[in-house]
Image (spheres, helix red, strand yellow):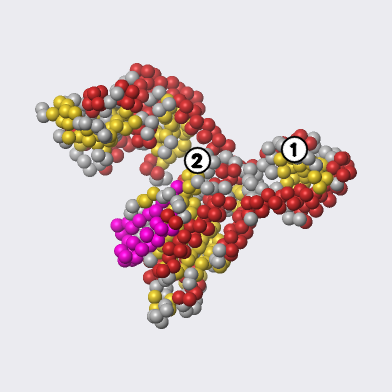
Amino acid sequence: MSEITVILPEREGKKFAGDASVADALAELLSNKQRKQTVAVAVGETLVDLSTRLDSLGQETLEMRPVLISSDEGLDILRHSTAHLMAKAVLDLYGPGVKVAIGPSIEDGFYYDFERETPFTPEDFKSIEAKMQETVKHGLPFTRKVLSKTAAIDLFAEKGEHYKVELLKEIEADTVSLYQLDDFVDLCRGPHVPNSSWLQVFKLIKVAGAYWRGDEHNQMLQRLYGTAFDDKKRLKKYLNDLEEAKKRDHRKLGKELGLFTISDQVGPGLILWQPKGALLRRLIEDYWKEEHYRHDYELLYTPHIARLDLWKTSGHLDFYSENMYSSMAIDEVQYQLKPMNCPFHIAIYKSQMRSYREFPLRWCELGTVYRYERTGVLHGLLRVRGFTQDDAHVFCRPDQLEEEIFNILDLNLNILATFGFDQYDIYLSTRPDKYVGSEEHWQKATDALKQALEKRGLAYQIDPGEGVFYGPKIDIKIKDVLGRSWQCSTIQVDFNLPERFEVSYIGEDGKEHQPIMIHRALMGSLERFIGVLIENYAGAFPIWLAPVQARIMNITDAQGDYCDKVYQELRGSGVRIEKDLRNEKLNYKIREAQLAKIPYMLVIGEREAESGTVTVRERSGKNLPPMSVKDFAAKIKDECAAVLG
Ligand SMILES: [Zn+2]
Ligand SMILES: [Zn+2]
């Protein structure tokens, strides 16, 4: 057996016998401490187990990169291995009646899908975790075996694991790899941790229904979710964040704060805004419209349906039909509920002859669109079937492109900052394999996007080939207080629609030219953005967004008239105010106002009524000295102005 040279990053190579394992090589090349942290290695793009024989990798010189258990790649291996561990425990406990489906790692954890008649309960979670710990204690190895596909099918068929058989039948290769942990064998590509003693820190999180392969015509399975970490502190932090996220769930808060509701009678994925939610939405819309007006945008309104032919011309019928609802006949002509606003803005553009002098045209609309989403993926305000995009289209000349993109980016980030979002991940997506438009146009547009990002001093990542077929784009994911990312803004250059609709303008040379069209959504949709806002602020909105800024509460009935007077005065000066004059104990009223997350409580007793003041209590519980009603109104105004300018 010839020798194989193993090279680690920034180190001298060393020769090993071909039948040595990766672990053997690392034992000599790494310190003990480093070795204990290394869960697998990367050879080129491929991650391999530590038990892999060097000569099986087919190279005389192996450049290896150790994968640390604490890294994202390492955690992924750890979590995926824990999914095996969990499946073994479930089979050990609940026996042959349970069938296993798939068990991948996911962001923050892993899951495994089981077919089992009895639902899993929280008590089951404890038993499963205890069973998993037993296997951890025994330090059992994950052993890799390569079998012919037919032998693997026989093996799983014999165990009655028909989901595995179905998966195997679709694999094209002749051989497949299996991994064995004690008596549990799974079809898997690997790699895994060397043995179960690596899997000390895990937790089962929840169970949910999931159709086999996500298809509602298939068997409903039980998906057990869990997570695993390389150390206890990280798990603890994760579980705390999860608790915090649960408290912030916008569906729960939306109900408690009376913001929105969804009615089965109306239909899933269709949002009904309750008065407080509607007020919150109006505040956002008003601010949005004013900001756009200030930045030289003009506001448009367009209808919700259009002739089906419009969507043929736009290409949506060919490329987007799975997201569109069925058409309807009006006077024997087919019409279509709109999934996008763009073709309407183009129709407005084309309503008259355009000259280069008019450019740039900056048109915005809060346009409500309807898109099909499967019932299973609908989620509160975040995934819905009808939503209002904060849309804008800019038509400009090629020489204006860079400046326009910079302006859009600048406006976007300023508006996001007003809402409290100043952390984001930015992605620039470039030309995919299938595209329309010339290579030269793509290059120019991509450069313009890049330059705008650089001019604004923004770090970004390039997503090669991830642009839409019609042009490159910038996506902005905002980060909330828990560090979670939310896709909101997108800026897209489009060479396709102007071409399809034969959009043109008369240039300085008196000839017809095709303008550049930029699509932009800042919040994405009002529904989704408000969902994110609710979770970010846990419903305790900043003063400029709070649907109710203050609530008046009396100590005894004797102050009723004075409370009414204060209420009228504040409402008259534009403060969003409520009153609670019920015959209840003050502490009870305060507690309710706190639960309603109202920024200020105005407590009125005998003293306040006599001196014509209010005692102000903050949401945090802090008391301010009594002040006149006028001063309180001015304070609210100042606090809003500090944000809105
Ligand atoms: Zn696996
Ligand atoms: Zn558009």
Q: Is 489 in the magenta?
A: no
- Mark 2: amino acid: Gly
Q: Which residue is mark 2?
A: 483
Q: Which residue is mark 1?
A: 623
Quadrant where the C terminus lies? bottom right
Q: Residue furthest bottom?
A: 510
Residue 51 appears at what percent x and percent y? 24, 26
Q: Residue at x 66, y 48 (%)?
A: 543
Q: Which residues fall within the magenta stretch?
A: 425-453
| Nearest to N terminus: mark 1 or mark 2 | 2
Task: Residue at 53%, 43% (x, y): give it.
Answer: 480
Q: Quadrant of the N terminus?
A: top left
Position of residue 142 measured from the top left corner of the image (x, y, whole percent): 29, 26
Is residue 367 shown to the viewer in this render? yes
Viewed as shown, does residue 608 lie left or right of 110?
A: right
- Badge 1 local density, few (<14 within 10 Å), some, or many (20+)? few
In the shown orientation, is residue 512 left or right of residue 147? Answer: right
Please give the name of the residue rendered at 36% of the width and 63% of the height, measured from the top-left corner: 444
> Can residue 100 be seen?
no
Helix, strand or loop under label 1 = loop
Q: Amino acid at mark 1?
A: Asn
Tag 2's secondary structure?
loop
